[in-house]
């Protein structure tokens, strides 16, 4: 991926990710305080659940905490597995296994998925349960990987097990890093097990700018810090260098045909019905989003298929991305106003990606574990 690395350094490098790299303050004061508090409480934890984003299994780790976590009983929970490519996930499980790290892909909003995580937690704590009356499980991770959602799901499960026990819910916000306090929640008794939710914290500086872009793309850094257009440029660079749009054509043709057939069936109403009935409260919204995603995919496919340059060359890749912005603006039906148009394109494009409407992805590459 020579082209993407060159483009990152050339056009996307000056973002203030590195210490002293700009005026942008993306490491708020509460994160520094939280990092210190987490380190202190780690000494007391019997088990640590490190929540990472399944789309960036390595980039979403907090490197400043890894030395502290390596000496603890640890379970890596790869959350948002529904947004990650299932064809690659098994390779990541094998990788973590080769590193002697317990790892489980989860969906924090799925009760069955969280139950499997809790079963693994009990296995990991089995040795300690026999000799400790009170156990502490700590949940850590960078912002917006789904820690609070996981805590809330654990509470729901615990409430069903112990209905007389009052549970508090963790605060979940739309922006990364909203959980600013460290609070303990009792999830079981005999023995008593407490779960500590912690704020999402990032390292004060990120040496690898591409890791910073991946964190921004997945939502761990606020869009305003990097800028939606830069994040969208990076996403386009990733898709193009991987040739992803070229794989969309056949699946899109089948999906568009299915959408058109389903839509045709649902609009066969008589004139009388059309006068007296409201618009069907069915999947029309879903169909619109799917249709929009298909238009975006088709636009990217067409521009890449017709492109006569080399996506491995940073200048050619930059030229292709410019063409794709214009094509996306037409596909998304956004009025032509230079800067505003590009911003709206970027926002809608990122929304579709983050919602999984462009398909499941894993942005990190599995490290080569071959020693030979």
Image (spheres, rainbow, N blue to C red):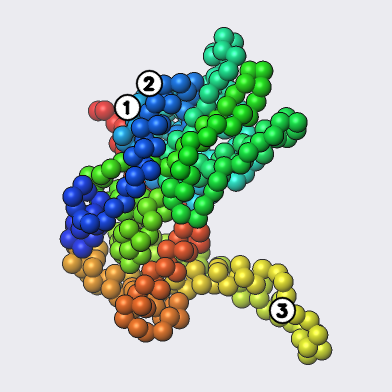
**Residue denoted by label 2:** 71
Query: Is 59 rendered above or below residue 73?
Result: below
Q: Position of residue 161 (x, y in %)?
A: 72, 30
Q: What residue is drawn where x is 69% and y is 34%?
A: 166
Q: What residue is drawn where x is 20% and y is 56%?
A: 22
Q: Are marks 2 and 1 in contact (CB under 8 Å)?
A: yes
**Residue denoted by label 3:** 279
> Which label number is shown at residue 67?
1
Task: Return the disc, 3 or 2, that comes first in the chain's sequence.
Answer: 2
Report whether residue 366 is seen. no
Q: Are marks 3 and 1 in contact (CB under 8 Å)?
A: no
Q: Is residue 243 left or right of residue 190?
A: left
Quarter of image, res 4: bottom left
- Helix, strand or loop for disc 1: helix
- Helix, strand or loop for disc 3: loop
Quarter of image, res 67: top left
Q: What residue is drawn where x is 37% and y is 78%?
A: 341
| 10 Å crowding of disc 2: few (<14), some (14-19), many (20+) | few
Q: Position of residue 136 (x, y in %)?
A: 53, 23
Q: Position of residue 162 (x, y in %)?
A: 73, 29
Q: Is residue 188 left or right of residue 184?
A: right
């Amino acid at each position: 991926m020579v082209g993407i690395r060159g483009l990152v350094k050339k056009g996307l490098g000056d973002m203030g990710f590195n210490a002293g790299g700009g005026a942008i303050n993306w490491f708020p004061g509460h994160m520094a305080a939280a990092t210190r508090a987490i380190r202190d409480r780690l000494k007391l934890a019997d088990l640590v659940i490190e929540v990472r984003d399944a789309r960036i299994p390595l980039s979403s780790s907090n490197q400043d905490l890894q030395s502290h976590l390596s000496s603890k009983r640890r379970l890596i929970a790869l959350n948002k597995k529904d947004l990650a490519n299932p064809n690659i996930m098994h390779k990541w499980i094998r990788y973590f296994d080769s590193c002697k790290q317990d790892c489980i892909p989860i969906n924090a909003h799925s009760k069955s998925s969280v139950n499997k995580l809790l079963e693994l937690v009990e296995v990991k704590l089995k040795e300690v349960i026999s000799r400790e009356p009170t156990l502490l499980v700590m949940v850590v991770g960078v912002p917006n990987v789904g820690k609070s959602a996981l805590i809330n799901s654990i509470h729901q499960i615990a409430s069903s097990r112990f209905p007389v026990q009052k549970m508090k819910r963790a605060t979940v916000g739309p922006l990364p890093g909203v959980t600013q306090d460290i609070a303990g929640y009792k999830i079981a008794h005999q023995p008593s097990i407490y779960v500590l939710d912690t704020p999402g914290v990032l390292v004060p500086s990120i040496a690898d700018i591409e890791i910073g872009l991946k964190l921004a793309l997945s939502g761990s850094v606020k869009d305003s810090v990097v800028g939606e257009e830069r994040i969208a440029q990076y996403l386009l660079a990733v898709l193009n260098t991987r040739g992803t749009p070229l794989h969309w054509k056949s699946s899109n043709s089948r999906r568009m045909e299915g959408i058109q057939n389903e839509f045709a069936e649902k609009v066969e109403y008589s004139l009388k019905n059309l006068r007296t009935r409201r618009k069907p409260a069915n999947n029309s919204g879903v169909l619109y989003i799917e249709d929009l995603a298909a238009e975006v995919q088709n636009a990217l496919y067409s521009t890449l298929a017709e492109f006569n340059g080399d996506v491995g060359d940073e200048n050619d890749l930059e030229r292709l991305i410019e063409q794709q912005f214009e094509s996306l603006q037409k596909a998304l039906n956004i009025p032509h106003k230079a800067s505003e148009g590009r911003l709206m394109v970027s926002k809608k494009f990122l929304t579709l990606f983050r919602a999984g409407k462009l398909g499941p992805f894993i942005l990190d590459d599995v490290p080569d574990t071959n020693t030979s």
